[in-house]
Amino acid sequence: MADPIHQFEIIKLFPIAKIGGQQIDFTNSALYMVIAVAGISAFLLGSTRGRAMVPGRMQSMAEISYEFVAGTLRSSAGSEGMKFFPLVFSLFMFITTVNMIGIIPYTFTVTSHIIVTVALALLVFVTVVAYGIYKNGFKFLKLFVPSGIPIYILPLVTLIEVMSFLSRPISHSVRLFANMLAGHITLKVFGGFVTMLSGFGLVGWLGATLPLALTVALTSLELLVAFLQAYVFTILTCIYINDAIHPGH
Amino acid sequence: MATPTTHTTSSVGQAPHPKSFPPFESHTFASQLVWLTITFVILYVLMSKAALPRIGGILEERRGRIEGDLAAAERLKSESDAALAAYEKALSEARARAQAIANETRDKMAAEAETRRKALEADLNTKLASAEQQIATKRTAAMANVQGIAEQAASAIVERLIGMVPSQADVSAAVSGVLKH
């Protein structure tokens, strides 16, 4: 049976440099990042080149993506949050695209590596903390002190708030990573059943139809998950940005 | 985060790869981070400098165009409404004026006719009165003449018949008596 972990392996394509004892290579992961960025840019810039007043299909899709993310950000962080629109939009498009590419067989899913999702979550976390302190100064700490709480349980609530705030990048990154990883492993396992059973002659062929049907169903489920996790990552980013702008609960 | 996993190399066919869980192989982290940084920065710059301003501009332009068109339609509609109202006002005014002129003319004509009729009537009345007076004088004159002629004729007839002239007073009385009948 095929190894369901094999698909996550980082394969060195060619070396680039050695910086501070760390070998930097161009890997399959890097290749798919480049493909995703090139694809997003080609899609958004190519489809809007005509600046048509009445959009065609591709331009319409580009506009829908724009308005979808803009609407999400504006509804959760207000119009002040729109200064983070390029960041949120880039995050959404990048994660959606690499997730979707990952559904295609024989491809590599960039977000199935925790280092990538952690880096993206930390980018959001650092941005939120930096902007929150820059914008609100000391008042940013009000985020941890909810108003209207009796004074005798306030220390406990504040402790919980601090812990939940600090655990945000962990849950933010692990959610995406784990969903991508688990989905792909499941798909691979069921796909493996199909090949394994089909080796047992006619009965095996008949028996393989069940995991095959499940694989098809799971693929459509994974399409949903790929989009949904990108959306969840985006909307959590919007909520965290809202905390940076309006720290008072 | 994850220490380099030192699995016991399992013997499932794959000799060159030490079996470990790829997402936790920390020696791949640096490459991934470097390329994630490079690609994401490029994506961010392309989005913030080129793609998003362009799409935002397109949407803004379209919204402006639609709003402008709606405003123009609204303006044209109110203009046509105003024109219609003005037209109806002018029409009703003209109708009222025509009515007034007709009434005035009718009244004037009626008054004129009335005065003319009255003048004519008065004229006719005076003419009638004078004519009647004339007739009366003529008749009295004629009557006076008739009596004289009758008296002369009567006295002449009597003279022929009896050969003597009757007295003027008798003839006069006789003629008057006959004329009274």
Image: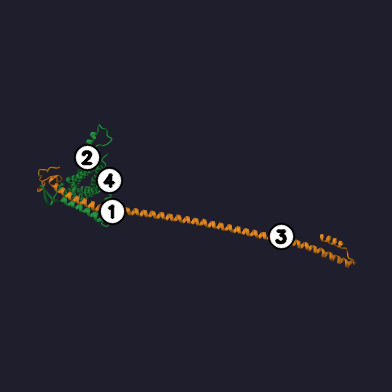
For residue A209, the mark is: none
Looking at the image, which residue is at 77% across and 62% down?
B139
- Distance in Å between CA atoms under marks 3 and 2: 130 Å
Q: Earlier in the sequence, mark 1 or mark 3?
A: 1
Instruction: Please say if A203 is above or below B94.
Output: above
| Pointer 1 residue | B57
On the same chain, marks 1 and 3? The answer is: yes
Query: Dot 1 lies on which element?
Result: helix
Crowdedness near tag 3: few (<14), some (14–19) or many (≥20) residues, C-alpha within 10 Å: few
- Residue farthest toward the top in the current orientation of the protein: A152
Is B43 placed above or below B180 here?
A: above
- Marks 1 and 3, Cα distance to the nearest angstrom? 106 Å
Dot 4: within a 10 Å radius of its alpha carbon, few (fewer than 14), some, or many (20 or more) residues? Answer: some
Q: Helix, strand or loop at disc 2?
A: helix
Shown in green, the chain is: A
* Observer-nearest of A148 and A103: A148
Q: Is residue A154 left or right of residue B138?
A: left
**Quarter of the image holding residue A54?**
bottom left
Tell me the residue that label 4 is attached to.
A80
Instruction: Name the one closer to the observer, B19 or B35.
Output: B35
> Are the residues under badges 4 and 2 in a single subunit?
yes
Q: Which residue is mark 2?
A: A165
Residue, x 61% and y 59% (percent of image)?
A: B113
Quarter of the image for the C terminus of chain A: give it. top left
Query: Above or below — where is B137 with respect to A142?
Result: below
The orange chain is B
- Discs 2, 1: same chain: no
Q: Is residue A169 visible?
A: yes
